[in-house]
Amino acid sequence: MQILIIPIGFILWYFAYESKPINNDEVTSLWEKENYVKRTKLLNILKESF
C-alpha cells in the first residue's frame, strides 16, 4: 500500500507546487527592476572590457 501512496503523494505535491500563483506585488517588481539594472551594468562592464 505504501508503494502506491508515496508516488501519488509526490505527484499531488508536484501539481500543487506548479499551480501556485505568481506574486506580482510591489516588492517583487522593485526587486526585478534592481536585478535588471545590476545585470545591465555588469553586461556593460563586460562589453567595455572586450
Image (tube, rainbow, N blue to C red):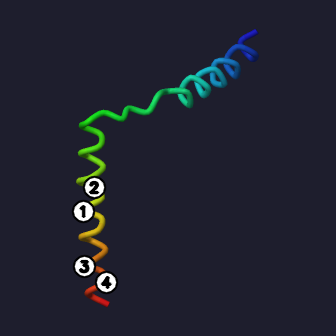
Residue 35 is labelled as 2
Instruction: Give coordinates of residue 30: x percent, y percent.
Output: 24, 45
Q: Quadrant of residue 18?
A: top right
Q: Is residue 8 above or below residue 45?
A: above
Residue type pointed to by label 1: Lys
Q: Say whether marks 2 and 1 touch (CB < 8 Å).
A: yes
N-term mark: 3 or 2: 2
Task: Tell me the residue that label 4 is attached to.
Answer: 47
N-term mark: 1 or 3: 1
Instruction: Give coordinates of residue 12: x percent, y percent.
Output: 63, 20
Camera-side residue of 10 and 40: 40
Residue type pointed to by label 3: Ile
N-term mark: 4 or 2: 2
Question: Which residue is at a point 60% across and 28% down the rendered structure image?
Answer: 14
Q: CA distance from mark 1 to mark 3?
A: 11 Å
Question: Which residue is at a point 55% across and 27% down the rendered structure image?
Answer: 19
Residue type pointed to by label 4: Lys
Camera-side residue of 6 and 34: 34
Q: CA distance from mark 2 to mark 1?
A: 5 Å
- Mark 2 secondary-structure assignment: helix
Q: Is residue 39 above or below residue 14?
A: below
- Mark 1 secondary-structure assignment: helix
Q: CA distance from mark 3 to mark 4?
A: 5 Å
Task: Tell me the residue that label 1 is attached to.
Answer: 38
Residue type pointed to by label 2: Asn
Question: Which residue is at a point 32% across and 90% down the rendered structure image?
Answer: 50
Task: Tell me the residue that label 3 is attached to.
Answer: 45
Residue 2 is labelled as none
